[in-house]
Image: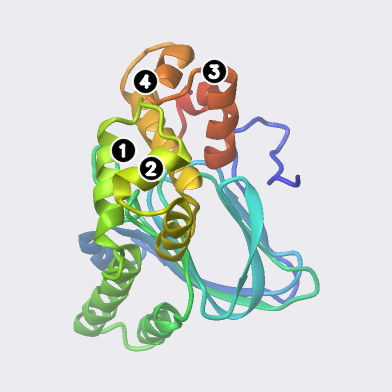
Amino acid sequence: MEQPSKKSGGPQQDRTFDSPGTQCWYLTAEDCPLMVSHGLARVGIDDTAAGYRRVRLRPAGSFILETSEGEGRVFLEGKWQKTTQGEVVLAPPRVLNAFRTAEGQHWKIAYVRYNEPAGVKPLVDSGSPLRQAGHIRLGLALAGLRDEWDNEREPTMLRHWLAIIDAIARRLARPWRMDQRLWQLWNDVEAAIDADWPLHRLASHAGLSAEHLRRTCLAALGRSPIEHLTYLRVQRAQDLLESGDDKIEVIARKVGYTSGHAFSRAFQRCVGLLPSEFRQPHPH
């Protein structure tokens, strides 16, 4: 399986490739301090050609990417997946982000990245979907912000555009249609994350058949029940790795793994780093 490669300097480095013909517009909180009130670190629109690629090993905040035109590939929880016009991809903080233009394709994207220091509840979390379809609103709002920034830069208008962009991102991260049975199920699982949760137990706890639970999870979260269980275990492990000094094997048991090897493999697939690498200090 192809994975985002790492530079020879080790796992703590990001990668950026801009291919010929690619045009990138972006705005950071350093450029526009008005973004800080919404927690936005960077927003942008990239109109890309083949060869464009981004790898962010351990971003500090939630990330939302919308495909406005064309076709690209995003690395989601261990595998490259296709994304096309109108699709939105969401990624939580501290998890590998990687995306690239599909071979021979043109790909236009709009994105927002948040600044979410340790201890701040992230926008994209266990209740957020992995991906959604049927959206172009984020790109339209960012185009409005770009036009204002590149021309008048009137503070009141900038505030309005930033508020709209933040509101769209928050709606994407909190879809109101999510089945309430799922909310209760995953809240209960998080409260007992060290327990054994085979598919039949998850389905029984939710009051659904295994197949109904699978379809409901895929529709609401973009993951199967077992994939989402793994995601929750890894999220808890990240917190434990950052906040304490327990051995990897101890943390594995605390999040429901009987095998340290299986835990490390699942963690690397979701985060892009081994647990021991994740624990190392990382410059932001």
Label 2 Cα neighbours within 10 Å, binned few <14 / some 14-19 / many ≥20: many
Q: Which residue is mark 4?
A: 254
Residue 72 percent location from the top left of the image: 66, 69
- The disc placed on residue 189 is 1
Mark 2 vs mark 3, foreground winner is 2
Image side of residue 4 versus residue 138, left or right: right
Q: Which residue is mark 2?
A: 202
Sequence-earlier tag: 3 or 1: 1
- The disc placed on residue 18 is none
Sequence-earlier tag: 4 or 3: 4
Q: Helix or strand or loop: what does disc 2 sit on?
A: helix
Q: How much space separates mark 4 and mark 1, taking CA atoms?
A: 13 Å
Residue 249 percent location from the top left of the image: 47, 13
Q: How much space separates mark 3 and mark 1, taking CA atoms?
A: 19 Å
Q: Which residue is mark 3?
A: 259
Sequence-earlier tag: 2 or 1: 1
Sequence-earlier tag: 2 or 3: 2
Q: Quadrant of residue 265?
A: top right
Residue 73 percent location from the top left of the image: 66, 63
Q: Residue at x 35, y 86 (%)?
A: 148
Q: Is residue 179 visible?
A: yes
Name the amino acid type tagged 3.
Answer: Ser
- Vertical position of residue 23 compared to residue 127: above or below: below
Name the amino acid type tagged 2.
Answer: Leu
Quadrant of the image for the N terminus?
A: top right
Q: Helix or strand or loop: what does disc 1 sit on?
A: helix
Name the amino acid type tagged 1.
Answer: Val
